[in-house]
């Protein structure tokens, strides 16, 4: 039985099996979560990303896809890099790509035998996705995707993001699909 938990904090400080990175298609780092993970994870993470670019991902990682590397100096064992869609009011179909990010991250996590996974609010930062909609897609997709996880931990950076995720969770009440929401 997977538990979905919400905490306010820094995703690079989570003692979990794997941490999901809100990356970009280059896989070569950036700001926000990406910057924090590379800064704290250290050069080993970037080296592993470069190796992916030199092998299977010559053109970069496509939006909606996910791939794992070592987590370097982070407390976690793996980083699962995924590329969220950039928000555009005129492109509602991108919501499916955002959902795919979470589904693909859980698939990769299952392949690795991951039991505890920390996830950020993908696309809700630099990529501009409206927070409430990003939270609905994130929580709904993870709730509805069967996986071997014991915990999916959303790590929300700052009170506003946490409150929005908490509000979405309250909208749903208890007894959600196979996943349950606990604080
Ligand atoms: N821990 C947890 N959450 C964080 C952290 C952190 N250390 N740093 C930022 N966040 C939050 C942001 O506040 C936002 O709510 O993660 C969410 C996602 O924000 P971004 O990291 O900006 O990711 P995204 O919106 O998906 O944009 C991805 O930004 O950093 C670049 O290389 C990255 O081009 C890519 C783009």
Image: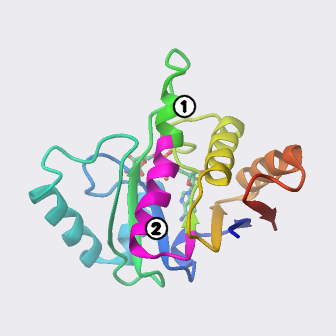
Quarter holding the N terminus is bottom right
Nearer to the camera, 112 or 162 = 112
Horizontally, residue 117 falls left or right of residue 135, namely left
User: Residue sitting at 73 percent across and 58 percent down?
Assistant: 178
- The magenta-colored residue range is 100-117
Quarter holding the C terminus is bottom right
Image location (x, y in percent) of residue 62:
30, 42
Q: Residue 95 carries which label?
A: 1
Nearer to the camera, 115 or 166 = 115
User: Residue sitting at 40 percent across and 52 percent down?
Assistant: 82
Q: How far apart are marks 2 and 1 (CA)?
A: 23 Å
According to the picture, the residue beneath numbered tag 2 turns out to be: 110
Image location (x, y in percent) of residue 131:
67, 40
Q: In which quarter of the image is residue 46?
A: bottom left
Above or below, comparing residue 9 to residue 96 in the picture: below
The colour style of the image is rainbow
């Amino acid at each position: 039985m997977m538990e979905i938990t919400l905490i306010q904090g820094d995703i690079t400080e989570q003692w979990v099996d794997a941490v999901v990175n809100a990356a970009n298609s280059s896989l070569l780092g950036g700001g926000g979560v990406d910057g924090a993970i590379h800064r704290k994870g250290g050069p080993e993470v970037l080296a592993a990303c470069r190796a992916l670019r030199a092998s299977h991902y010559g053109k970069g990682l496509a939006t909606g896809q996910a791939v794992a590397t070592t987590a370097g100096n982070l407390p976690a064992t793996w980083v699962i890099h995924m590329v969220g869609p950039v928000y555009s009011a005129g492109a509602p179909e991108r919501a499916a790509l955002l959902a795919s990010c979470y589904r693909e991250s859980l698939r990769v996590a299952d392949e690795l035998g991951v039991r505890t996974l920390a996830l950020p609010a993908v696309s809700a930062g630099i990529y501009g996705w409206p927070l409430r909609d990003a939270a609905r897609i994130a929580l709904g997709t993870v709730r509805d995707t069967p996986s071997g996880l014991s915990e999916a931990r959303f790590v929300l950076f700052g009170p506003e993001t946490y409150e929005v995720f908490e509000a979405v969770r309250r909208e749903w009440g208890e007894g959600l699909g196979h996943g349950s929401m606990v604080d």
